[in-house]
């Protein structure tokens, strides 16, 4: 089994607004790095190399979805690369959400999840909390970097 992840966000500004330019101008660099990382399998993207312009099932949101061989591979990319610098600045570009904005779930090797599948997993996490069907970092006791390295 591989690990799928979805992260959604509501941008504070239009994606072509100068106030979000630092995020948008580095998105290709961060995604290109992800594709070179050990354990990377697949990323939901269009011809631009990212998914910021792909409509999502959530109103006014952008989505990032990828598949990794293991949680440890995803954890390393998120917390031990340049990705962390941009994650720590998310409050500059994205509004806080009242519901979950991040979910993980297991997929068969070779499976590329759809946004509708990801929506069902995120809705399940909102309704039931962490289960084997949909979960966040806290459901994976062997990965702990999220506790010590995430922003406040």
Image: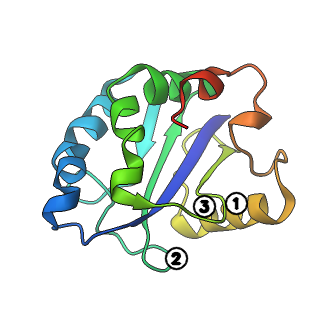
Assign a secondary structure to mark 3: helix
- Image quadrant in which the C terminus is located: top right
Residue that mark 2 sits on: 57
Q: How far across and down, in percent of the image, does residue 20 sit? A: 23, 58
Q: Is residue 111 visible?
A: no
Q: Is mark 3 in CB contact (under 8 Å) with mark 1? A: yes
Q: Which mark is residue 42?
A: none
Q: How far across and down, in percent of the image, does residue 17 sit? A: 16, 67
Quick one: label 2 or label 1, which is nearer the N terminus?
2
Q: CA distance from mark 2 to mark 1?
A: 12 Å
Check the image and report above or below for 23 versus 83. Answer: below
- Image quadrant in which the N terminus is located: top right
Q: How far across and down, in percent of the image, does residue 56 sit? A: 45, 73
Q: Is residue 95 visible?
A: yes
Quick one: label 2 or label 3, which is nearer the N terminus?
2
Q: In this rendering, would 95 be left or right of 49?
A: right
Residue that mark 1 sits on: 121
Assign a secondary structure to mark 2: loop
């Amino acid at each position: 089994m591989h690990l799928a992840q979805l992260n959604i966000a509501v941008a504070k500004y239009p994606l072509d607004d100068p106030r979000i330019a630092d995020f948008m101008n580095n998105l290709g660099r961060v995604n290109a790095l992800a594709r070179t990382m050990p354990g990377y399998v697949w990323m939901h993207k269009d011809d631009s190399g990212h998914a910021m312009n792909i409509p999502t099932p959530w109103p006014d949101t952008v989505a990032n979805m990828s598949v990794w061989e293991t949680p440890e591979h995803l954890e390393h990319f998120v917390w031990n690369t340049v990705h962390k610098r941009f994650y720590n600045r998310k409050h500059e570009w994205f509004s806080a959400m009242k519901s979950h904005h991040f979910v993980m779930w297991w997929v068969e090797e070779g499976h590329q999840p759809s946004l509708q599948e990801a929506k069902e997993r995120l809705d399940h996490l909102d309704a039931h909390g962490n289960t084997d069907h949909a979960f966040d970092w806290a459901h994976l006791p062997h990965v702990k970097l999220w506790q010590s390295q995430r922003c406040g």
